[in-house]
Image (cartoon, helix red, strand yellow):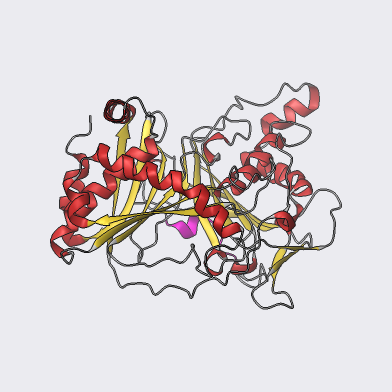
């Protein structure tokens, strides 16, 4: 085939299918954090929509209608119904009278929605593995101001459904981090899936609840300076057998203690990256590893809360120590940092940090930031055609040394790591170290 192309069939707002409250809702402290006000982009790839495989039993005209509807129509209808339950998503962010305290205006303007078709199969574009054979501009919505007057930083969600000639389809999603973390965004998308499959209401009842979220008198630190880095993109797949092997080694070392697959892959990342860039690190300098953990259990948030409930977990050590340790030993350092998180989060929630902002970051080459997409819930979203073969962020940041951890694409079993954390001069060494003992 020649040039692969995507054609937009229709686009515009999808509004709630029933009347919703008209009100202005406050955002919580973490929601209001300056770096969260922006759209996070992700792709969700569904292999085949020819025959719905998970839909609830239907009969008569309803069943026949479902069979003939394209995926975009199914998602569009379910989205309108889901917005009745998640009506803030149909509004916009507005700046309140108090500086630094934006809120959500529940205006029922809707979620911007695009229906599109591609002139190829998913196999033709390698199931959208990187490097992408279709541009991100073809797969997620980028409406012009004439079509969508709400500024991107104030829009709460945008969705595009692109159907391929093989029957597969892709959801291109943009959600605003200021109203939902990854768990919250996945909860919303699962609600759309629930209604698409015929459930009368979403399985999880949404809870706004921002007024009960901690609001410590701590001023967010200044926006960080971004280094000028040209980072290479590298993907790694960790088989389940490799992860299980290192879990066993950690248990042997610690007298039977447990660790997660996430602990293993980020310890491996930290170890190999430090060894790869070590020659360019000032002797005695510390290397840092940072990731965000859910604080829902620590803050005792009620089920259904879909706002930001994350807290940073930071690990640091001299570069020589990290490079000279084993991966299993570094797993212990990661586990210890996770153990400390609960107390650090409570100190922040109660305003006991001495004014220090724990969310403040330093983006230098000695630091690497990890985002865990493996257990957020995006891999469980089912619109009636089964769960996605892969679901994850569209791009990494090109300036910050960062890594995404996600489930390996079906039918692979294991974990995928999308790394954008080393420059070209270190890429070969880093990739070689990461892959040297994978089985």
At which x and y percent is residue 218? 58, 69
Horizontal side of 406 relative to 24 (left or right) equals: left
* Of residues 206 and 381, the one drawn nearer to the viewer in this rendering: 206
Judging depth in this view, the residue of 328 and 43 nearest the camera is 328
Rendered-image quadrant of the N terminus: top left
Q: Quadrant of the C terminus?
A: top left
Q: Nearer the viewer, residue 222 or 79?
A: 222
Q: Which residues are magenta?
A: 135-143
Up-down relation of residue 396 to residue 198 (above or below): below
What residue is drawn where x is 18% and y is 34%?
A: 437
Q: Position of residue 101 (x, y in %)?
A: 67, 71
Residue 35's spot in the image, x, y percent? 52, 67
**Residue drawn at 17 percent across, 67 percent down:** 282
Q: Where is residue 216 shown, x and y percent of the image? A: 63, 64
Asked if the magenta segment contains residue 384, the reply would be no
Q: Is residue 125 visible?
A: no
Say if 399 sits above or below 404 in the image: below
Question: Up-down: is 272 above or below 90?
Answer: above
């Amino acid at each position: 085939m020649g040039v692969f192309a995507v054609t937009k069939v229709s686009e515009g707002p999808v509004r709630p299918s029933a009347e919703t409250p008209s009100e202005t809702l406050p955002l919580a402290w973490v929601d209001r954090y300056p770096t969260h006000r922006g759209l996070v982009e992700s792709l969700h790839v569904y292999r085949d929509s020819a025959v719905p495989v998970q839909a609830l039993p239907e009969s008569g005209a309803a069943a026949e209608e479902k069979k003939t509807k394209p995926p975009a129509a199914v998602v569009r209808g379910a989205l309108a119904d889901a917005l009745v339950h998640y009506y803030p998503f149909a509004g916009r962010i507005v700046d309140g009278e108090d500086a630094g305290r934006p809120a959500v205006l529940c205006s029922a303007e809707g979620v911007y929605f695009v229906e599109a078709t591609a002139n190829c199969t998913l196999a033709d574009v390698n199931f959208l593995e990187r490097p992408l054979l279709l541009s991100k501009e073809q797969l997620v919505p980028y409406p012009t101001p004439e079509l969508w007057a709400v500024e991107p930083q104030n829009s709460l969600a945008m969705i595009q459904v692109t159907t391929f000639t093989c029957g597969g389809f892709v959801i291109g999603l943009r959600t605003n981090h200021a109203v939902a973390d990854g768990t919250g965004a996945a909860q919303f998308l699962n609600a759309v899936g629930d209604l698409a499959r015929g459930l009368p209401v979403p399985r999880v009842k949404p809870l706004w609840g921002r007024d009960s979220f901690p609001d410590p008198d701590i001023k967010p630190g200044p926006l960080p300076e971004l280094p000028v880095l040209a980072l290479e993109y590298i993907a790694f797949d960790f088989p389940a057998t490799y992860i299980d092997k290192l879990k066993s080694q950690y248990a042997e070392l610690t007298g039977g203690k447990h660790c997660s697959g996430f602990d293993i892959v980020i310890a491996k990342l930290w170890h190999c990256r430090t060894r790869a860039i070590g020659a360019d690190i000032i002797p005695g300098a510390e290397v840092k590893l940072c990731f965000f953990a859910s604080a829902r259990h620590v803050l005792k948030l009620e089920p259904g809360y879909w706002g930001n409930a994350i807290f940073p977990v930071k690990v640091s050590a001299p570069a020589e120590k990290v490079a000279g340790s084993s991966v299993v030993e570094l797993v212990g350092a990661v586990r210890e940092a996770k153990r400390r998180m609960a107390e650090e989060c409570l100190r922040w929630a109660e305003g006991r940090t001495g004014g220090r902002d724990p969310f403040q970051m330093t983006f230098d080459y000695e630091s690497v930031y990890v985002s865990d997409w493996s257990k957020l819930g995006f891999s469980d979203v089912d619109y009636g055609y089964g769960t996605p073969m892969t679901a994850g962020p569209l791009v990494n940041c090109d300036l910050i040394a960062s890594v995404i951890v996600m489930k390996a694409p079906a039918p692979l079993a294991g974990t995928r790591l999308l790394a954008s954390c080393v420059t070209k001069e270190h890429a070969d060494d880093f990739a070689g170290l990461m892959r040297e003992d994978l089985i």
